[in-house]
Amino acid sequence: MTTALIELPTLNDEGFFVDPGQWTEEMVPELARREGIDELTEAHWTVIRFMRSQYLEKGSGPTVRALGKSSGVSIKELYQLFPGGPAKTAAKIAGIPKPRGCI
Amino acid sequence: MEDKIKKISIIISHGSLEGIYPGLIMANGARAEGIEANLFFTFFGLDAIHAKRHEHIKLATVGNPGLHFATWAGGLPGVSSLMTHVMERKMETLDIPSIPEFIEMIYDTGAGLYACKASVDLFGLEKNDLVPQVQDIITVGEFYEMAAGGQIVFT
């Protein structure tokens, strides 16, 4: 299996994109790998794309609760897909800032 | 930089609306950060996981200086229910889940939910008085074992 070496734009020390505009979908597998996700399923992609589109539409990515309600993926499944925290991890992979919200 | 928090065990000991929510928000917030979380319900906190009471949690309107509402007024019939209702409506507009829904959600995040054995015995309860999301009824010693290596928050 060949892994193309993708050069990633600047990330801040928490791992979020400094400039979300520099993100492309090609970066996703490498970003996911850095978050411990070696295999991306359909459900992973659904969440990542949803995070990105919400950010572009609303200026901020959704919190976990919003993700669970609107992405079509349940809270239970979200935590199975992204054990390190769904909104936080998916935001890193989707190249958007960390969503701010308490629930 | 200090080490990141990896595990947190939160005790909920009050049965009022404002006494229950902070612990739930902390547990849910911990899970969203990838932090392992446990919730331990004791004394009146058991109401939050009591199948017949968890939908009827009220705001404390008597002797509650934080509410900025006269204690004598807070004790009038119906006032506590009314103010609870007002608070719940506000929370709904902010998409803050009700306590029963929140408990289910926190369970779905993979957090542990436990009832305090001493309080369960004190109130004459059994496991089937509690909501299904409660994994077990445990002693304080068992709680400490479970909390070992992480932070403990008392609410």
Image (tube, coloured by chain):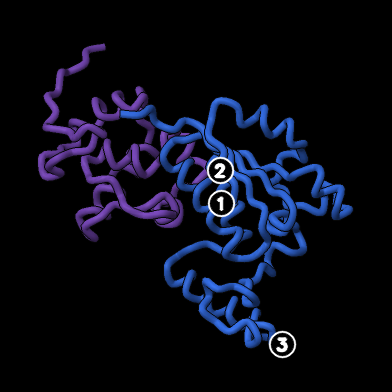
The residue singled out by tag 3 in the image is B77
In this view of the protein, which residue sits in the foreground, B152 or B130?
B152
Q: Amino acid at mark 3?
A: Pro
Determine whether B148 is above or below A59 in the image.
above
Give the residue at mark 1.
B23
Describe residue A99's horizontal placement relative to residue B36 as left or right. Answer: left
Residue position for label 2: B153
Question: Visible in this render: residue B84?
Answer: yes
Q: CA distance from mark 2 to mark 1?
A: 8 Å
Element carrying mark 3: loop
Taking the spot 73% from the left edge, 58% from the top edge, the residue there is: B44
Q: Which subunit holds the residue at mark 3? A: B
| The image quarter in which residue A49 lies | top left
Q: Amino acid at mark 1?
A: Gly
Is disc 1 on the same chain as disc 3?
Answer: yes
Residue contact at pointers 2 and 1, CB within 8 angstroms: yes
The chain letter of the purple chain reads A
Q: Amino acid at mark 2?
A: Val
Distance, label 3 to label 1, CA atoms, is 29 Å
Secondary structure state at the residue bearing disc 2: strand
Determine the colour of chain B: blue
Q: Where in the figure is residue A52, as x and y percent of width and height?
A: 25, 48
Of marks 2 and 1, the one in the foreground: 2
The answer to which of marks 2 and 3 sits earlier in the sequence is 3
Chain bearing tag 1 is B
